[in-house]
Amino acid sequence: MLILSANDIQQIYTMRDAIEADKKALKAYTEGQSSVPLRSHFRLQHGQTLIMPAHIKNTDICGLKIVSIFPDNPKLGKPSVPAQVFILEPQTGEVCAIIDGTYLTQLRTGAVQGAATELLAKKHCINAVLIGTGGQAASQLEAMLTVRQLKNVAVYGLNKSKAQQFIYDMNKRFAHFGANIYYSDNLDEDIAQADIITTVTTSNQTTFNGECVKAGTHINGIGSYTPEMHEIPPNIVEQAAIKVLDTKEGVFSEAGDIIDPINNGMVRPDQFIELGELILNEQRGRQNEDQITLFKSVGTAVLDVYVGYDIYCKAKAMNIGTYI
């Protein structure tokens, strides 16, 4: 059995690798080539644990993610949201890999946004806005920089000092992209200039003013994942010419910023398509430079398992990781 840490993954697996794997995973999902049982949820004395399995039928890739939320873990010097992904060997059914699930989740979540942005954003994008500076933010930034040659990225977070430290770190880490990453002191102004907007928060209120969004902007809603959370302004959900979801089943049951506009009669469920449908037929994407496009994701175990297996295969071929 192969044990793969975040450092192991970083040595061999790029954001571009993850974007391509995510596309294949969601294509299989939309084609009905996957099985994703409801996640099991256990409330424990000091926190909660989720078990999320998935099976991709046409490749026989199978596995599961175990993720826990234990708020007091930092007092013990441990992460508050530990996660591991278990991959099964298709030929034998044995667990063949245990992968750092925290980093894998960040990577595949950034990559699914990158896939959507690559397919939906205008070809020539200059300015972007990233809202949120938490654990998912770095991979979201990397994905945008990977699929478009951005010149400026405005970053906004409620904690300005934390955001400025994030910006300092990201300017060093992603210097090779050549983008100017800076703090947004005037979010409305930066939104008005943005070609791409990505919001990755757990906010219960919309994170930007939809009235400021210009024609032709592509918007990604990545952070919110419960009916109470609302990152995307309702008028943007209504106005978007192309509305794309990672999975209809997940978003329609979990994402408040999509559920509420549907319930309020602003949009209909049949106006949305899955990213897998767009991957299968790119003609369903952007038709002109003035369309506002929207992508909403709440995540699915199909991504964890497919990307995890892809990482395992590459690590095995390159002799990376620790065998036990």
Image (cartoon, rainbow, N blue to C red):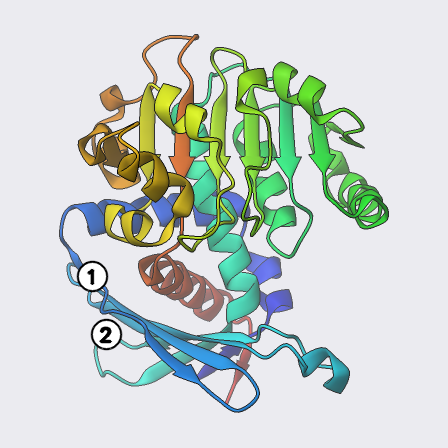
Q: Which residue is mark 1?
A: 59
Seen in the picture, residue 283 relative to 288 is either above or below; the reply is below
Q: Earlier in the sequence, mark 1 or mark 2?
A: 1
The N terminus - image quarter:
bottom left
Residue 143 horizontal/vertical position (percent):
55, 40
Q: Which secondary structure lies at badge 1?
A: loop
Seen in the picture, residue 148 relative to 214 is either above or below; the reply is below
For the point 23% across and 64% down, which residue is it?
A: 36
Q: Is residue 191 left or right of residue 260?
A: right
Amino acid type of the residue tagged 1 in the rendering: Thr
For the point 39% across and 28% down, which residue is it?
A: 237
Amino acid type of the residue tagged 2 in the rendering: Pro
Q: Nearer the viewer, residue 61 or 161?
A: 161
Q: Is residue 275 left or right of residue 129?
A: left
Whole-number angstrom distance, CA of label 1 to CA of label 2: 8 Å
Q: Which residue is mark 2?
A: 90
Tag 1 and tag 2, C-beta contact below 8 Å = yes
Q: Is residue 48 left or right of residue 27?
A: right
Q: Quadrant of residue 238?
A: top left
Q: Which secondary structure lies at badge 2?
A: loop
Q: Nearer the viewer, residue 49 or 12?
A: 49
